[in-house]
Amino acid sequence: MDHKFKINQRILLAKLINAIKLLLFFISYNSYCQQQIEIFGEGVLTGIISTENEIPFWFYKNTSTRQGKYTNGAAYGKFGAKYDFGKNSSLEGGISLMLRDGVENNFQRENLFLEYNNKWLRATVGAKERPIFYNGLSSTNGNMIWSLNSRPMPGIILEASKPLRISNTFALDWGIAHYSLNDDRYVTDTRVHYKRLGLIVTFNENHKITARLQHFAMWAGTSPEYGKLPSDFEAFVNVFFARAGSGDDPEGEIQNAVGDHVGSYLLEYKLNTSLGNFSMYHEHPFEDGSGTGFQNFPDGVWGVTFTPENQKIIANFLYEYIDTTDQSGSSGVSGRDGYFSSYLYRSGWTYEGNIIGIPFITADNSINLDENPSSINNNRVRAHHFGLMGNFKKIDWVFKTTISKSFGTYGAPFNPTLENWYNYISFSYTTDKFGIISIQGGADTSNIYDTIIGGGVSYKYVF
């Protein structure tokens, strides 16, 4: 059954492009119909200067790699069309392309997808960027395992288009997906299994609690050391339930579980008051049984946001405390969880060398993985992150500042500890007819590396 899981990326991309062409032709041919047709797009041009080869941290982190660490110029274009069938169902296709310097592949797609929506289901085929949460102020975009720090992975996902209402109080959110890591990595053709289940409890219009469990697993592929890894239906069932493998599997997959697993619990409480709206949340990571049993507490993201009722100057405030240093302790069978690293999938929780989750964890892509067990060189971090946004007349502004300490890994600690202070500010002016003009500034300081000061100008036109 292995061939049924195999995905030929070139054929998939060609089929998606042809499908989008057919969708656009169908929309044009049927433009006289009464159903609503929406065509949309945008273009962005960006120029960046910096005192160093690198640009400031928040210029390129969580941008889906629209800018890279060494980018000075970038162009981005997006085009899409949505056909409304009526009765709460629609079909949408989209493509977005990126051209920038300072990265290995200058010209790449960001999004390329087809998506069907109705009142209870969203089905997406291809690669599509995740929506922006917490107004873009969060250091993780509201998900420490799956942020916006890498390009969207290609795959197929079925999920709730909106929470499924069980009663006036309870609603369920769900999703299940199969993705492919089609980049250059230690284990080629690695697959990613994903699922989530959330419970939303609405006590009244002022009080709401959300609890969510999400689970990812890298599995299958071809390893230089072990050869072809289990990829049949039995292996998928083992991956789905995080069960141990058979006697033919690599030793770690027999003792632990087939594939490399990572996930998180989320608990969020939303409170609406006369002063404004508050959100308080904690996302707790796990990679094995010790994490699911909270032996790595208090690791995770602890956050609070506030949206004031009066938004004349400040429209939103966010604070997050990030800690990944415990990892179930430094010793013992359950210790050293080693977030985002894997002895078998040595490229770790990365896509094209970029961490898929929290951007403060880092990978060293110069490491020879034939000789070293992991590319993850820093997964023990503590950070305080602040975000503010607001507007004054036609000017929207955003400010972020992050103070972080990076300790390396338990196996290879940093000496001395790396201390960073990342700062970012932007001002955007929306014209009446000619788009949006933005200027950005950033300044990063470190106890080890040179200070980085940078600035940028971008122009965005939306239609």
Image (cartoon, rainbow, N blue to C red):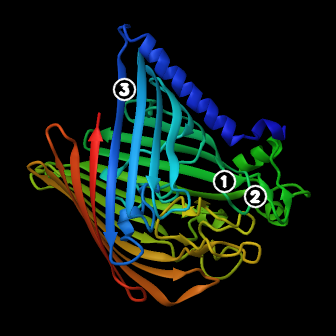
**What residue is drawn where x is 42% and y is 59%?**
67
The quadrant in which the N terminus is found is top right
Q: What's the distance in space between the residues labelled 1 and 3, CA to CA? A: 36 Å
**What residue is drawn where x is 22% and y is 46%?**
436
- The answer to which image quadrant residue 247 occupies is bottom right
Q: Which residue is mark 1?
A: 217
Viewer-nearest of discs 1 and 3: 3
Q: Is residue 165 above or below residue 61?
A: above
Viewer-nearest of discs 2 and 1: 1
User: Are the two marked residues, 2 and 1, in contact with CB atoms closer than 8 angstroms?
Assistant: yes
Q: Secondary structure at mark 2?
A: loop
Task: Tell which of 36 and 289 is nearer to you.
Answer: 36
Which of marks 1 and 2 precedes in the sequence? 1
Q: Which residue is mark 2?
A: 257
Q: What's the distance in space between the residues labelled 2 and 3, CA to CA? A: 46 Å
**What residue is drawn where x is 70% and y is 46%?**
240
Q: Is residue 443 above or below residue 163?
A: below
- The answer to which image quadrant residue 408 occupies is bottom right
Q: Position of residue 389 (x, y in %)?
A: 21, 57
Which of marks 3 and 2 precedes in the sequence? 3
Q: Position of residue 243 (x, y in %)?
A: 76, 53
Q: Which residue is mark 3?
A: 39
Tell me which amino acid carries mark 3.
Answer: Ile
